[in-house]
Amino acid sequence: METILFPAVDLGVIAPMFTIFTWASVLLLVDVFLIPSDSKRFTGYLALAGVLATGIVTLMIQVGRAVGPGTSIPSFSGMVVLDSFGLTITWIFLIIAAITIAISINYLPQHNIELGEFYPLILFATGGMILLGQSTNLIMIFLGIELLSITLYILTAFFYPRFTSEEAGMKYLLLGAFAAGFFVYGIALIYGGAGTVDLLEIGAFIAAQPAVVPGVLPSPEVSLVMIGGGLVLVAFGFKVALVPFHMWTPDVYEGSPTPVAAFMSVGTKGAAFSALLRVLLIGLPGLQVFWVPVLGALAAVTMIVGNIGALQQTNVKRMLAYSSIGHAGYILLGIMAANERGTEGFLFYILAYALANLGAFAVLIALEKRGEMAWSLDDFAGLWRRQPMLALAMAIFMISLAGVHPPQAFLASSWSLRRRGKVGRGRWC
Amino acid sequence: MVPISYYIMLSAALFTLGVLGVLIRRNAIVVFMSVELMLNAANLALVAFALQRGGIDGQVLVFFVITVAAAEVAVGLALLVAIFRNKRTADVDEVNQLHG
């Protein structure tokens, strides 16, 4: 009988998610017992304070542990890691959560769904996203995905008793649970092949085997890992809406409350892609010859179907859903590059995409506030005369989503120019 | 002792049954049951591999999967009840107001 040894734990590594989960749990109780039902907006303000507190803790950890490029502090037997990738993506998630809560505070009472648990649920989902960004173990990735998904099922159906919202929640739940089945079976096969669920150890196991080449049958263990990796990839495809696993996306975005759709479109994508990035680059780099062509084909099909699908829509929420499918294809390219520049591009793209997409949804919410449903493209005709500022903002966000990021392009190009100047190979600097 | 490969074959068969159930059956409760079948097939595979390897990682994951599945079913059944109150049906084909 093996004795169970408790490993040394470093609470600093999980400090950001510890803060946000604690805050969310306490906020649930505070909301029920202390905040009267006609002033639930205070719950929203307290949730914003929670995001701020998490940001302060994250900053303290970042400075206190001197986390920079190359830092990697594992803890809890290597289940989670503190590194600059995890912290950067944590910052992006906190920005997304803060914007979502801010645009919900007025939206909920206007649609008579002002229930206090909305805000703690957003915090729980954000905590799940942070866990996904930091985990280096398949068990933790499974937990993070499920934590994020189960809260999102509830949030999607938050328009109770509106039927379309329940339908959206049901569709999302059935497909999400289906994907979870693939994910767990994939983990089981990887565990069967490699004998471990730790990404670093899986990577070491594959590196120790004879090199895998197409056309030669690999050993049974490596074959198990490959089949398992394929199933895990299918599950991630469902979560981030890659074609052909994208069918739920337009329905779910249309049915769910608009702030939830905004949160889901950028948050789930960022979190699931960052976990996928760790799985592929830490766990399965030895199988690169197999997953690069597969991901390339998926990315190409996703970009084409997403963007052509968006052209046919007359409902703005469905159009944004198809646009988010197309963007999943672009983000996948950053992962496929499988190098440091690709990862940098991935993080930058997630931030730029999050700001543009949240902005577009915020304009939709601002229009809904003025009594228009603003979901049909016809509602946007003549918007410049009625709401010039909103029309201008929508135009900027749409141009951003179309791929011409005016502010980001400026930042990105000046940043990469400066980088070239430092290396000394620059043509312009 | 029963060889490990028997367990794996049984779990693969159960998983396939679960996938087919999700794809073919139209009653939402049966679809849920099929998803549970998929998860439990994975649990069986995990326990069998853990027995073969002599480690505990697989057995630990099984506990997490059971917990998560319970949470998922709690949310799912609540949604199902809400939909049934509205439409008096649990057929996933009749829950189809959203389409492009």
Image (cartoon, coloured by chain):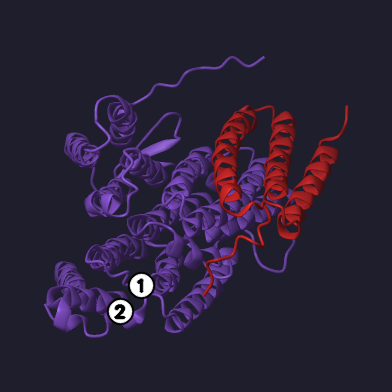
User: Which residue lies at the image location 56% right of the left edge and 71% below the top edge?
Assistant: A293
Instruction: Measuring from the top left, give residue A164's x and y in whole percent.
Output: 49, 60
Provide the residue designation for mark 1. A375
Q: Is residue A210 visible?
A: no
User: Which residue lies at the image location 76% right of the left edge and 53% below the top edge?
Assistant: B21
Local SS, label 2: helix
Tell which chain the image draws in red.
B
Residue at the far right: name it: B1
Task: Give the quarter of the figure containing the N terminus of chain A.
Answer: top right
Up-down relation of residue A254 to residue A57 (above or below): below
Instruction: Measuring from the top left, give residue B38's x and y in whole percent.
Output: 70, 45
Between A36 and A389, the one lying in front of the other is A36
Residue A260 location, quadrant: bottom left
Up-down relation of residue A173 to residue B24 (above or below): above
* Side (left or right) of B88 relative to A285: right
Residue A324 location, quadrant: bottom left
Indicate which disc residue A63 carries: none
Q: Mark 2 lies on which chain?
A: A
- The count of marks equals 2
Indicate the amino acid at tag 1: Trp
Chain A colour in the picture? purple
Provide the residue designation for mark 2. A379
* Side (left or right) of A172 relative to B41: left
Task: Give the quarter of the figure containing the C terminus of chain A.
Answer: bottom left
Up-down relation of residue A27 to residue B27 (above or below): above
Indicate the amino acid at tag 2: Asp
Q: How crowded is mark 2: few (under 14 residues within 10 Å), some or many (20 or more)?
A: some
Q: Which chain carries label 1?
A: A
